[in-house]
Image: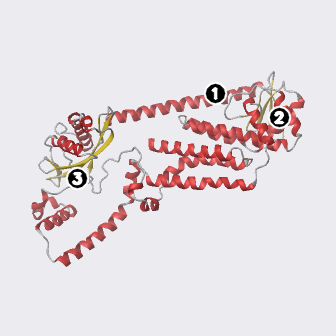
Amino acid sequence: MIHFVLQTLAFQLLFLIVYDLFLKHETFYNWNRVYLIFTPILSFVLPFFKIRLVKEYIPEQYIIQLPTVLIGNSSTPETTLSEVVIGATASFSEYLTLSKIFQYLWCLGFIVSLSIFCYKFYKILKLKKMGNAAKVGNIRLIYIPDSTTVFTFFHFIFIGESISEVKKRNILLHEKIHINEYHSIDLLFFEILRILFWFNPLIYIFQSRMAVLQEYIADAKAVAKTNKKDYYQDLLSQIFQTEKISFINPFFNHSLIKKRIVMLQKSKSKKIFQLKYLLLLPLVCMMLIYTSCTEDANAQLANNSDNVSKSESLILHNISVLKESIAVKGEMTEQERKALKGLLLLTTENGFSEPFFEDVVADAEIPFGVIEKIPVYPGCENLSQAEAKKCFSKNVNQLVGSKFNTNLGKESGLTGRLKMYVKFKIDNKGNVVNIAARAPHPQLEAEAIRVINELPKMTPGVQDGVNVGVMYSLPIVFEIKE
């Protein structure tokens, strides 16, 4: 989720930068309106697009990796333990707590944002109730006593009775364009986004840009139907009190008056400048390449199911190659025979109870997804399979966190966030064996192996009533503060 939010924020920021640098000052108002509506939606959609061809043809060393750590990123099916962070205070259980806190904060922000929206809407209803209504075609005029307020909300025009009749003509002409162009829908769209994504400041900026653009559109069409000089004088003659509501179209907002006059005086942009919108194409392409080359843990889990059919084809191909190799060689070594027999054991129903496989049962490594009973950490007995797994992970994390030599960073001159990956096997007797580590420094590898060697003897895993070995992969992150 955090990965998605960060990507969305980055994309929206890029779209806003392009708009402010290249498009904001052009008179292609309708194109800009589409841009401001379309790009926030595109920002939410793009993270879900993954172009597999891009990922396949870009070498792995060029793939951008986000801070998200892949847990158990292995080519073989193994049990994956939770990531252990050494030198940091956050544990897996604390992460869950922080996740819940984030959810509570979002709910609180949602409720506050929704309440503010309802209050704004209530203010409009209150003005409607206290005003004097009149109907002109499909437009409803609401005259507000003793007020100079002017704004539009859908097909309602709220206008203060204190405004002179001379001024009302241009004002109503301007506000009718807001109604005919359905500008309230645009602002209400951003208001909904503000409620859902109240923590995203860029949504507020998008809404502000849209409000300014709508004034440009209304001014441009209104001035074409009246005297430009009179229209300027109306803009400059008074500073009206305006309701501060984000989803209405106020006629007078004196912070915008200068910008509106500048845009009215601006010559119509040449059509060739419409080519600026083509900047959107390379920008979107770069975003697609980025999203295609980065995946969070949840996305990778989803992709695993998509790769099942490919895996089946690969297995059939490898079997065919194995047959040819055996035929060419003519005979197998004892080691090769045992390896092939161990593979057959895993694919034979009730194979662990068959006498034929007795000599390879001890060396068998059972995929965690199919094992009947997982290995049990001392003290985690008499728990369900799911609870035993959590208990196992918790105890391993605590042991590694407490036993790891945190002074190693200073002694070796290491700094920053260092990642290690440890693989080990719990054999059919419950012993921790076959420990291997991969780390950016030899001393870290040695320390990781030393710590895993301190794991106690376990209750071994069971398959078909026979004790079996199970492989594990444990990511470790060593944070060294400078």
Side of 165 relative to 77 (left or right): right
| Secondary structure under the numbered disc 1 in the rendered image | helix
Q: Which residue is rendered at x = 71% and y = 29% of the image?
A: 124
Q: Secondary structure at mark 2?
A: helix
* Residue under pointer 2: 171
How far across and down, in percent of the image, does residue 42 sit? Answer: 57, 49
Residue 71 shows in this picture = yes
Residue at image location 72% in from the left, 48% down from the top: 30
In this view of the protein, which residue sits in the foreground, 147 or 336? 336
Q: Label 3 amino acid?
A: Ile
Is the residue under label 1 in contact with that under label 3 (CB below 8 Å)? no
Label 2 close to label 3 by CB (< 8 Å): no
Question: Residue 322 lies in what quarter of the image?
Answer: bottom left
Does residue 171 lie above or below 459 as drawn? above
Q: Position of residue 373 (x, y in %)?
A: 20, 48
Q: In front of the other: label 2 or label 3?
A: 2
Q: Which mark is residue 119?
A: 1
**Amino acid type indicated by mark 2:** Ile
Q: Is residue 434 left or right of residue 312?
A: left
Residue closest to the far front: 413
Q: Residue furthest top?
A: 146
Find the distance from the CA under tag 3 to the CA under tag 1.
57 Å
Residue corresponding to mark 3: 371
- Quarter of the image containing the C terminus? top left
The residues bearing labels 1 and 2 have C-alpha atoms spaced at a distance of: 27 Å
Mark 1 residue type: Tyr
